[in-house]
Image (spheres, rainbow, N blue to C red):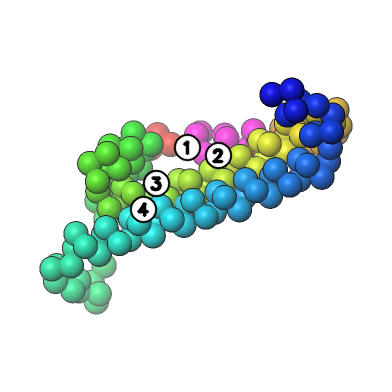
Amino acid sequence: MKKILSKAFTADQDIEKLIGYLLRYGVITASLIVFIGGIIYLHQYQHSSIPAYHTFVGEQAGFTTISQIMSGVCSFNAKGIIQLGVLVLIATPILRIFFSLIGFILEKDRLYILITFVVLSVMMFSIFGGLKV
């Protein structure tokens, strides 16, 4: 912990490297989750008939909240697992902005703290502000 909070660790390049690792591993993790969900989906629906593509039939409501996604993952539902991968992919750049905010706070760069906080606030409001329809 001491090493993490030292000035040597919080240098600008180190924070950029940490953010780079976050983006890289976030995308890889999301891709693996979606890939595993896709394999499970193909296994679960291998005997289904080919859908009629000339008529549009929308999906039923489901997996639109985090609790629905988690219950789908716990019940080993392929669509829930794929949706979890999409959720991780969406969360990755948001975490990048959050860690950038922490980096700017450690650097005490007030202008970028303000800008990053506004961007993060707009993203959070956009995500959580319009959920209830």
Q: Which residues are magenta?
A: 121-130
User: Which of the two discs, 2 and 3, labels the residue nearer the N terminus?
Assistant: 3
Q: Which residue does the numbered mark 1 point to in the structure image?
A: 130
The secondary structure that most of the magenta stretch takes on is helix
How dense is the environment of label 3, judged by Cα within 10 Å: few (below 14), some, or many (20 and up)?
many
Residue type of the residue flagged with mark 2: Ser
User: Which of the two discs, 4 and 2, labels the residue nearer the N terminus?
Assistant: 4
Residue 39 rendering spot, x and y as whole percentages: 30, 62
In the rendered image, the vertical position of residue 38 relative to residue 6, given as above or below: below
How dense is the environment of label 4, judged by Cα within 10 Å: few (below 14), some, or many (20 and up)?
many
Q: CA distance from mark 4 to mark 2?
A: 22 Å
Q: Quadrant of the C terminus?
A: top left
3 relative to 63 in the view: left or right: right
Q: Is residue 129 magenta?
A: yes
Q: Which residue does the numbered mark 2 point to in the structure image?
A: 126
Q: Residue furthest bottom?
A: 54
How dense is the environment of label 1, judged by Cα within 10 Å: few (below 14), some, or many (20 and up)?
few
User: Which of the two discs, 1 and 4, labels the residue nearer the N terminus?
Assistant: 4
